[in-house]
Image (cartoon, rainbow, N blue to C red):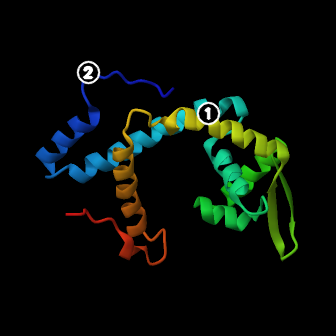
C-alpha cells in the first residue's frame, strides 16, 4: 500500500487556496497536482501487487505488450515506442526480464543492429498471474465507479491526444454530449 499521509487537511486543496490568493484560478494546477499524486499512489499499489513476481510496473507492461503481440516477439524499438519510453529504458527492462527468464533476446534478422525480445512460457505464466492480481484490485481504482472511470479515461485521453500521442487525434477529442 502507498504510505498513508493522514494529514489534517487536503494539501492540494490548501495549495489551491494559496495559489488563488497569489496568482488567480487554481483549477488546472489542482487537477494536474492531483494526477501526479494519484500516479504515486497507483504505482505504489502496482509495486505491492507485482512484488511477489519480482516485477516492476515497467517490466509488467513490457510482458503484457509481448503477450499481446501476434508472435510473442517484438523489436525493442517497437516496445519503446508503444510503451512511450526511452530506448535505454527498454534495453534495461528487457535485460532484467531476460535475466529472470521471462523473455529471450536475440538479434533482429531484419535489422542488423536491432534486437528482438520474445516472451518465454514462464513469462506468459507470470503475466497471466500478475494480471489476475492487478485485476483483482481493479488496478488500484476499486473505489471509483465504472462511469467515473470512463469519464476519467476520456479526460486523460484528451490530454494525451492534445499532446500529439496519436497522429490525427486532435479530431477525436472528447466533447460532452448535449
The residue that disc 1 covers is 133
Query: As drawn, is 148 to the left or to the right of 56?
Result: left
- Choose top left, top right, bottom left or bottom right for residue 5: top left
The residue shown at (72%, 53%) is 67
- Along the line of sight, the residue nearer the viewer: 21 or 111: 111
Q: Which element type, helix, strand or loop, lies under badge 1?
A: helix
Callout count: 2
The local crowd at label 2, few if under 14, some if 14 to 19, many if 20 or more residues have their Cα within 10 Å, is few
What x and y, as percent, mark residue 90? 69, 57
- Choose top left, top right, bottom left or bottom right for residue 48: top right
What x and y, as percent, mark residue 8? 26, 21
Q: Earlier in the sequence, mark 1 or mark 2?
A: 2
The residue shown at (82%, 48%) is 98
The residue shown at (26%, 31%) is 10
Residue 173 against residue 31 in the figure, above or below: below
Report the quarter where the C terminus lies: bottom left
- Can see residue 85? no
What x and y, as percent, mark residue 65? 67, 56
The residue that disc 2 covers is 8
Q: Which mark is residue 176?
A: none
Residue 67 against residue 111 in the figure, above or below: above
Residue 138 against residue 168 in the figure, above or below: above
- Can see residue 6? yes
- Choose top left, top right, bottom left or bottom right for residue 175: bottom left
- Along the line of sight, the residue nearer the viewer: 147 or 63: 147
Q: Which element type, helix, strand or loop, lies under badge 2?
A: loop
Camera-nearest label, 1 or 2: 1
Query: As drawn, is 69 to the left or to the right of 82?
Result: right
Amino acid at each position: 500500500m502507498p504510505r498513508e499521509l493522514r494529514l489534517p487537511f487536503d494539501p492540494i486543496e490548501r495549495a489551491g487556496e494559496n495559489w488563488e490568493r497569489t496568482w488567480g484560478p487554481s483549477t488546472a494546477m489542482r487537477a494536474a497536482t492531483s494526477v501526479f499524486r494519484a500516479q504515486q499512489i497507483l504505482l505504489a499499489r502496482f509495486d505491492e501487487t507485482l512484488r511477489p513476481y519480482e516485477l516492476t510496473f515497467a517490466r509488467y507492461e513490457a510482458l503484457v505488450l509481448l503477450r499481446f503481440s501476434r508472435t510473442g516477439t517484438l523489436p525493442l524499438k517497437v516496445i519503446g515506442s508503444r510503451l512511450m519510453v526511452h530506448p535505454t529504458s527498454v534495453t534495461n527492462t528487457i535485460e532484467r526480464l531476460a535475466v529472470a527468464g521471462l523473455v529471450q533476446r536475440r538479434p533482429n534478422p531484419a535489422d542488423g543492429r536491432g534486437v528482438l525480445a520474445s516472451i518465454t512460457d514462464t513469462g506468459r505464466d507470470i503475466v497471466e498471474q500478475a494480471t489476475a492480481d492487478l485485476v483483482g484490485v481493479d488496478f488500484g481504482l476499486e473505489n471509483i465507479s465504472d462511469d467515473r472511470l470512463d469519464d476519467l479515461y476520456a479526460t486523460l485521453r484528451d490530454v494525451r491526444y492534445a499532446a500529439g500521442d496519436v497522429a490525427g487525434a486532435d479530431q477525436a477529442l472528447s466533447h460532452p454530449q448535449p
